[in-house]
Image (cartoon, rainbow, N blue to C red):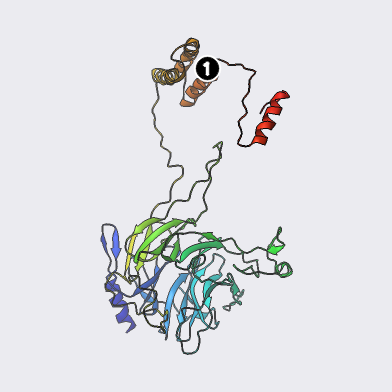
Amino acid sequence: MQHLTAGLLLVALGIAQTAGLAQSTISGLQDPAWAPDGKRIAVSYLDQIWTMTPEGRQPRTLTPPLPGVQREPAWSADGSRIAFALSRGDGFDIVVASAKGGAPTAVTTKPGDERWPSWTPDGRIVFAHRGDEPQGRAADPSLQWDLYVIAPVAGSDAWQAPVALSDTNDDETRPRVSPDGKRVVFVSNRDSVEDVDLFAMPLPARSVAKPVPLGASVRRGEAQASGRPADVKSKEPRAPAVVRVTRVAGEESAPSWAPDSERIAFYAERNSVGSVWVAAVEPPAREPNDDPIPRPRPAAPPLLVSRQGGAPAWSPDGRTLLIAGLPNPQPVYNGNPLRNDTDALPLFATTRAFQLWRIAAPLPVHEEGGRFTTELAPSPALYTAAFNRAWQTLRDLYYAAGSASDAWTRAGDKYQPRAAQAKTEADLEEIIDAMVAEQPLVKPVVTSSGAVVVSGHPLASEAGRIAFEKGGNV
């Protein structure tokens, strides 16, 4: 039966390239994830994790047939293992299996749900957890999600106890560790009741045994005992600094990092319409150092990359977004007071939901713009013409008549021969600057012993008057 299913999947994933778009013709595909070398992908299909080539070839199940639901595969940094969420009917747990296939080993066994695993480069796993559901409820939407990190036991298949990364009154879900291992982007309803946005925070180093969770308050003594950093000014341990990635009405989800660790692709709902966007995670940058007055440069706005909504996965080479379609957004309240957030069967969608397609990923904004070199060599006549144009422009503005006009003419006569000898644009600029430095006054010098003090307050005006009387200036 497994061989038959694999054959059907292979036929269905015979992907046709059309105008740069590749789309599967099978439904039920979710949670795409790229292997670090880009040679295979992992997906969830009919409650099992499968791996295959990016073209849909050589599909195979990751594990032997297991009861339950398998979701959200995530490749380890070396590509040797795949973590995923497994539910056997009593909540999701995180498990790990060899990328070549085999039985999984348990990573978490906490009561409740653990989902959305994401590997760090040093072999830890970040995930989201919520507590156990009340008796008789399959999945209570009101239960809160927090972020955790878990590390393996050295020399063993066992895992240490998970450590909280967040402890807030808000939901933090769908964590994704940046390729460089420095940050975690996540989905949260913090700061807004109606919106769900993307946020990013630093990922504590593995050497920090008990990091300060986001939103927690820990006494200084506890922080020192655990090796956590403390805020010098407040004498309290520092919680991680959170950066908002998106601030747009609607809901964001399914973030995926670009290989440069500076951008993310994500699913967004805008006015009940799904789409895929790309946004920068970096805070506003500064202008180049040679700018005499550095100015903050606003971060680039999110970029629309697909009008079809889906969960994106960014390829390791940065060139491709593999997207698993999502169904059209549904109302938050469906009229059922006993509703839950259990995932629906990913089949029989009327749109491109639960199908795979790929699009070209946008290139990063190149701050330098790409240098263009040429063999153009301006002649002395061209440099002289450029000099004359600069001289004429200033003459028309300031020295059209009067004694200053004659002085400006003499300055032009002095520096024009030097312009003809310029070898580069920089040489010409220095010559023009030297001429401008000797330019005559635009207006004649005016001297006066009188003064006018203008102020919006009588006391300030009186102070100015006294200063003038004593020989000072204001």
| Placement of 209 over or under 242, stated as above or below | below
Residue at 36% in and 57% down: 304
Q: Residues within 10 Å of mark 1 (few under 14, many from 20)?
A: few
Residue 100 appears anywhere in the view: no
Front-lying residue, 391 or 385:
391
Residue drawn 48% across the image and 86% down it: 90
Name the residue furthest bottom.
136
Residue at 45% x, 67% y is 196
| Residue 2 position (above or below residue 457) | below
Is residue 374 among what the camera can see?
Answer: yes
| x and y, in percent, of residue 362 in the image | 38, 54
**Quarter where residue 338 is shown:** bottom left
Which three-letter amino acid code belongs to the residue tagged 1?
Lys
- How far across and down, in percent of the image, does residue 171 sit? 51, 71
Note whether 227 is above or below 304 in the view shown: below
Residue 367 x/y as whole percent: 46, 44
* Residue 467 left/right relative to 455: right
**Residue 194: quarter of image:** bottom left
Residue 285: % across, % down = 52, 48
Q: Quadrant of the C terminus?
A: top right
Identify the secondary structure beneath mark 1. loop
Decide if residue 436 is on the left or right side of residue 466.
left
- In the picture of the structure, the residue carrying the numbered disc 1 is 443
Count how many numbered circles sit on residues in the image: 1
Image quarter in which the N terminus is found? bottom left
